[in-house]
Image (cartoon, coloured by chain):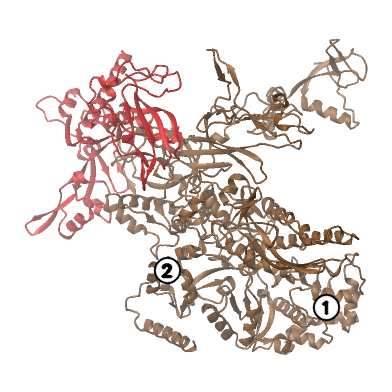
Chain colours: A red, B brown
Amino acid sequence: MADASSGEHEPELPPHLELQRTRVVCAPDAPSYTESVQYSGAYMAYGVDNSLRIEDFCKNLRVEIISMNEEDIEFDIVGIDAAIANAFRRILIAEVPTMAIEKVYIANNTSVIQDEVLAHRLGLLPIKADPRLFDYKSEEENANEKNTIVFKIDVVCTRKGERVLNSSVTSDQMKWLPEGSEMPFNTMTKFTSFGSSQKNLPGLPAEGISCQYPDIIVAKLRPGQAIELEGHAIKGSGNIHAKWSPVATARYRMLPEVNLMEDIQGKLAEELVQKCPTGVFDIEDVGTVKKAIVARPRNCTLCRECVRGTDWDKRVQLTRVKDHFIFTIESTGALRPEVLFTEAIKILNEKCHRIITELS
Amino acid sequence: MGVSKADEVDDGDNIVSSHKEGLEAPVKTAVDKFQLLPSFLKVRGLVKQHIDSFNYFINCEIKKIIHAQGNEKVTSDVDANFYLKYLDIFVGEPCVEQDYIYEPITPQQCRLRDMTYSAPISVDVEYTRGKEVVVRKGKDGKQEGSINIGRMPIMLRSSRCILAGKNEAQLAKVGECPLDPGGYFVVKGTEKVILIQEQLSKNRIIITTDSSGSVAASVTSSTHERKSKTNMVVKHERIYLRHNTFGDDIPIVVVMRAMGMESDQEIVQMVGRDPKYAGILNPSLQECAALKIYTSHQALEYLGSKVRSRNMFTKQKRTKVDEARDILATVVLAHVPVHQFDFRAKCIYLAVIIRKMLEAMLNREAVDDMDYVGNKRLELAGQLLSLLFEDLFKRMNAELKKSMDATLSKANRSTQFDIIKLIRPDTLTNGLEHAISSGNWAVKRFKMDRKGVTQVVSRLSFIAALGHMTRISSQFEKTRKVSGPRALQPSQWGMLCPCDTPEGEACGLVKNLSLMTHVTTDEEEAPLIELCTTLGVEDLSLLSGEELHSPKTYLVFFNGTILGVHRRPNRFAEVLRKLRRAGKIGEFVSVHVNPKHRNIQIASDGGRVCRPLVIADKGVSRVKEHHMKELKDGFRTFDDFLREGLVEYLDVNEENNSLIALYEGDATPDTTHIEIEPFTILGVCAGLIPYPHHNQSPRNTYQCAMGKQAMGNIAYNQLQRMDTLLYLLVYPQRPLLSTKSIELVGYDKLGAGQNATVAVMSYSGYDIEDAIVMNKSSLDRGFGRCIVIKKSVVPMKKYANRTADRIMAPELQSSAKGGVQVVARQQLQDHDGIAAVGEMIRPGDIYVNKQSPIDTRNNVNNPMALPDSAYKRTPQTYKGAAGETAVVDKVLLTSNDENHFVVKCLIRQTRRPEVGDKFSSRHGQKGVCGTIVQQEDFPFSERGICPDLIMNPHGFPSRMTVGKMIELLGGKAGLHNGKFHYGSAFGEPSGHADKVSTISATLVKHGFSYSGKDFIYSGITGSPLQAYIFMGPIYYQKLKHMVLDKMHARARGPRVVLTRQPTEGRSREGGLRLGEMERDCLIAYGASMMILERLMISSDQFQIQVCTKCGMIGYYHHKLKICLCSTCKSGDNIATMKLPYACKLLFQELQSMNIVPRLTLAEA
């Protein structure tokens, strides 16, 4: 580090080591150099400092949103380690809380679907309610307006002439009860003790709380059958049960990079373009010669068609950039995907703080 | 007709020649004959063999039985004028008698109400009453007017069943599943199948070698009246006849002589004049001469002396000669008819046997193969029932005769004698019902006593039930260690499934039918025999021995008996076949020319296995494109193909006369038939396996056994049924990689498994030994979730003193708050004292609050007004594993046909998979769940796909289940293609299985690697894995073995009363045994105190008082508080010691046998 004085030329790694350090090489048989090099003195022999400095990190970190809508987001994070990206992914899947039906009180269920199965299905319904407005409910705590959302389903299937009404119970028939449980008609016990109506809860959208999708079939009925129940949703996180996971999935992939090791021209170039099902390559006319170029490396799904066949692995090299992550979040609907990510950052932040306080 | 035939032949020639000319010309695409299969199954159904057999019995056989000699008339020994004659018999529609009204009944009602699905058997009779002759006849098949003689259990979906010909909606109305195959009975509420029984052919000559290697022949004759087995053996180069009516082996020439062949020349001629035969026959001839038997009479005398004297009860004493002659005529080779002691036909038959034996002696290849499927006959429900029915019918008639004679012998009767009143329908009803429900087939006439003929239909899964209907059990002993009968026979091809057989002791003995197999029923013989004679068969009686074996002629056998000879055997066979194809004779008649034995075998008997094949003329298929189009458009059925001679049934023997091409393209000018579809070689169970032809063969066999244990849907009416044990999958799926058999069978509608995304990689170390790692989120979302429903029946007994059990309302007690509440353990009950549907039930809960009368013997005046004190509580408590909550699923209150009230409760449990539950793919790869891992720790692909389970790659190399890999590829391609891919057996050439190359191309098109291996990131570290991971969907089955039903541990618990040792077994909450071998280990290690602790202190330690003087066991006197020895009558020398209670018990038991064990104690 002494010789890394200013003015003098920064020592560099030889190209093959630089490749190993920064790229995952996806050879036809197996990927290699998949792990990131953590040790700061790994390249001491070459005079290269592999340590990570906070200034560098701050300088290099870059986030770029590729696409975003109500449900999905795709964005690039550049300049972080796989472990950090993975931490976000893990937190998104398992630790960002949502609301989901946990307890189902069934007053009547004459349908073919069994009570437990019905309850299980209800639990999996995504509920459009901001979990940040609610508290966790402990086992001994009573259900109140701060920790429980109550829904009811009361459907009777009837025959009206040729038509059968309510032959399927869908998620929009689940009605939100802002005043709490209406269940106990003949028992003295109350299932919830709401202090006030949830309608007045600050931050709640005007349309109230409902299921994210109105057309999910919960059960099917035949004339004469009925379902009457109440579902109590509480706050929870995905590591307890997948129903509380706020994402359909959260994932990332490392930025694909396709290198042409030699000029590929003529017939071979056409063959290469033909080979790729995702259109990574294009043909460029350089005078009379047709030359293959890498036009859309992001499209690469690593089907490895381009490196299949004799000698093709010598012409094309597929790599992944180790510190560039294309992150995708598919939200189930409770929170917008970008909010989910910031929530995930908050949780990670909190965890770090916890460790720091515990260490000190 | 003749002209058209000639035309056909010409056409064939032309096609062949044109074929030859244009070899380079584009090959005509083979006709896709697959459509024939669904239409075949539509006409025949999957279990048609059972139903056909039963229909034949109900409609034809039963009529033959009552008209058989000896059955038709019941006469009296007392009154010669009296008789009862059966005119006709008729089996009606299934019905039940309720309050003297007959009501039609459905199978589902019978299942629920524990009744028998049976129909009344009624007979038309003619009998004498007083001086007049009375005829009682039913009107056109109606019961009215005819006599009811009992009830016949009705096979489901047979012609008499109410389900016959109903469509899906109508079936749903009567609570029946349209996919249920039928073919079984419902007896006392349980479904019973009569298993197909495999036997050696009846009435056929079978040449074998005995243990010493000498040639023997055996013929099992079977006629309506008699069954007998005749053996011929070679001893000291002489041939003997062995039969159990004779005490000794009889020289064969003596038998021939007894049957009227007095000259040796005639015998030799009959056997064959060829010197090589005569030479071997010589010792036998000489032996006869040595016995000085020259005439028929002498021979009969000799035979008479050897007859094993049996029944001494025969009234008129016959001479030995008469007896011998009678035995020869009726018992020995009983199936060869002898009219008025004209033995010629039997002589020829015997000569033919001898000739065959001689041939086998000269040439060992002529020995028959006992395991050859052509030598086997399958006995089905109809045949078995007819045996039983005839026996019971005879018994009923005998009983009738007995009671009739008793009545008629009374001198003066007050009322006129009416025999109808003496007919007791119970004999038949109970006999049939009992036989089917117990499986004990006892037929007195034939000394048949078989056990386990019927089995309860396995309803674990849809496939299990279906597989049960196609099962064939063999008569061979399971314990015998012979390989022959167990081995896969080449002649099984296409008839019996080569995969589906159990492992272990029944391996190879229990078989299953293939998809297209049909089992024949008996066919009328007389017209066929007549036809044969018209077609140029020269009758036996016109031939001399010389002509019989002339090298120009072939012997013609018809169902095992010799009809005569034919000079142009091939022509004869051809004509018969043409007639069959034209529908002039039955489609199942088989003609087999055997040039080796120089004979023609024509068979029309029941129990032969056969299968349909497309006929080809000189290698050109008769089924053309337009035929298939017509079939597709619904203008044609399978029967049309049969009728028009495009398709025919071949049995195993006739297959040997044909050259069958697997595909149309493989046909040569010699080809006579073309297979319809190669995958029909497999049965229903093996048909579920995708790409079975890529698997190592035992894997397919394993899957056949495991498919029957897979949970899923059982039937459309599964929730209406009340099965004792029901395993259901909450979210069953249809396999992504299907086969044609799956669709034909209906497995796509009643699946038993789920398509799991599988990653083949190592993970966590909890995946060794075939264990699988499961994704917790998948389980959260419902993967592998199952429902277990158990039935418990509460019979409400009625007692002899007219008292009965009763159900009381739940008991009340005053609650702490004031007011009343239901006592604990009964809170789940409704007001009627029976558990309410939907209530949770825990072990110890009372689900039926039943009470029984204390006194059930002494007569009670008014049973209804019995006081409460006369009842004791006999509640039904739920016994299940503690901590498991279950739910009352359904309660059925019903009564059976004897008006016994029954309460049936279904108790349901929903289970999610846990560590230790067993799963399996469709390739015989079973494994338990090793660990359950959070989703975020699971690896994920670039597209965010996270597997449902991880399987260790070590499962592949040794198992060689390549089919599983192709299933994964095909499933993955199917997902992205949006269609189901197929993997039918041997389906690649015909397009019923997708080729790997096309699958790979699809994968590439959608951006996957052609090999199915994906770039995967570790869910734990976040960095990519250092290998591409083979990942995709595989259909996984959850098997019924779950830890919850098996886990068991105990610290303290119940003990056996007798020995005071811990009980054994999980159901009794038993201890875990420290066995002999474990004990040996402890001894070897020297852990003496450990042994003492395990074997005595923790088991059955007991303190006894021993008299040190006499060594006997004393006792402790509690009142006097002293120890006493009862032998010494003193308490002076008593020592107290500890020993196992079992040891003390042994001493006492020895004492009771007058053995005195004495304990000699040393100071310790």
The residue drawn where x is 29% and y is 19% is: A197
Left or right: where does residue B1081 sit relative to residue A257? Answer: right
Q: Position of residue B69 (x, y in %)?
A: 76, 71
Judging from the image, mark 2 belongs to the subunit labelled: B
Dot 1 surroundings within 10 Å: few (below 14), some, or many (20 or more)?
many
Instruction: Decide which of B986, B181 is in the foreground and name it.
Output: B181
| Residue A299 to residue A128: above or below | below
Q: Which residue is mark 2?
A: B33
The residue drawn where x is 86% and y is 30% is: B1150
Judging from the image, mark 1 belongs to the subunit labelled: B
Residues behind callouts 1 and 2 on a single chain: yes
Q: Position of residue B659 (x, y in %)?
A: 51, 75
Dot 2 surroundings within 10 Å: few (below 14), some, or many (20 or more)?
many
- Quadrant in which residue B610 is drawn: bottom right
Q: Of the residues under marks 1 and 2, which one precedes in the sequence?
A: 2
**Residue farthest to the front?**
B414
Task: Tell me the SS state at disc 2.
Answer: helix
* Residue B642 at least partly seen: yes
Instruction: Decide which of A22, B622 is in the foreground and name it.
Output: B622
Task: Tell me the SS state at disc 1.
Answer: helix
**Residue farthest to the top?**
B1120
* Mark-to-mark CA distance, 1 and 2: 56 Å
Q: Which residue is mark 1?
A: B255
| Residue B172 to residue A225: above or below | below
Q: Position of residue B1105 (x, y in %)?
A: 83, 18
Tell me the amino acid under the disc marked 1. Val
Tell me the amino acid under the disc marked 2. Lys
